[in-house]
């Protein structure tokens, strides 16, 4: 009778341990999935922010033309000053 009791408790302990391992694994998987969803949301926001920055900095392409115009205006002003002052 003692052998029968020991063998019947062994499989119950094994089953309980198996269920506990599966529960812990399920919790880990759920946490990983929730973190992945959170990361995906943050990545989407970051991607939108990058698009905004890209649109805002695309206009900087005209800076070279503005600088060139400024230099021409400066040269013209110097020429006018030389004519006006006589130097």
Image (cartoon, helix red, strand yellow):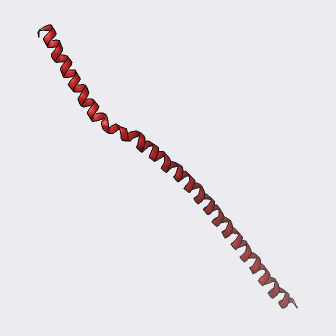
Extreme residue toward the left, this view? 87
Q: Quadrant of the N terminus?
A: bottom right
76 left or right, relative to 36: left
As drawn, 63 above or below 28? above
Instruction: Please name whichever residue, 9 or 20, is drawn nearer the observer in this view of the structure.
Output: 20
Residue 8, horizontal then vertical, whole percent: 82, 86
Most foreground residue, 70 or 50: 70
Q: Quadrant of the C terminus?
A: top left
Numbered circles on residues, count: 0
Q: Residue furthest top?
A: 85
In the shown orientation, is residue 75 left or right of residue 24? left
> Residue 45, how many percent across, how many down?
53, 49
Identify the residue at horizontal 69%, vertical 68% (top origin): 24
Task: Name the one closer to the observer, 52 or 28.
Answer: 52
60 left or right of 40 in image: left
* In the displayed structure image, the side of residue 75 where residue 25 appears, left or right: right
The image quadrant of residue 19 is bottom right
What residue do we see at 48% from left, 50% from top? Answer: 47
- For image coordinates 71% across by 70% down, the residue present is 23
Q: To which quarter of the image does residue 65 belong?
A: top left
Examine the rendered structure and indicate whether residue 12 appears above or below residue 66: below
Whether 8 is drawn above or below 65: the answer is: below
Q: Residue furthest right?
A: 1
In this orientation, which residue lies closer to the viewer: 69 or 49? 69
User: Residue 66: x, y in percent?
Assistant: 28, 31
Q: Position of residue 36 (x, y in %)?
A: 58, 59
Report which quarter residue 6 is drawn in.
bottom right
């Amino acid at each position: 009778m003692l052998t029968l009791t020991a063998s019947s408790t062994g499989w119950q302990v094994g089953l309980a341990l198996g269920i506990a391992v599966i529960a812990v694994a399920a919790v880990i998987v759920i946490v990983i999935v929730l973190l992945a969803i959170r990361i995906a949301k943050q990545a989407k926001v970051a991607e939108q922010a990058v698009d905004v920055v890209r649109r805002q900095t695309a206009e900087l392409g005209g800076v070279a033309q503005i600088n060139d115009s400024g230099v021409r205006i400066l040269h013209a002003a110097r020429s006018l000053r030389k004519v006006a002052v006589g130097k």
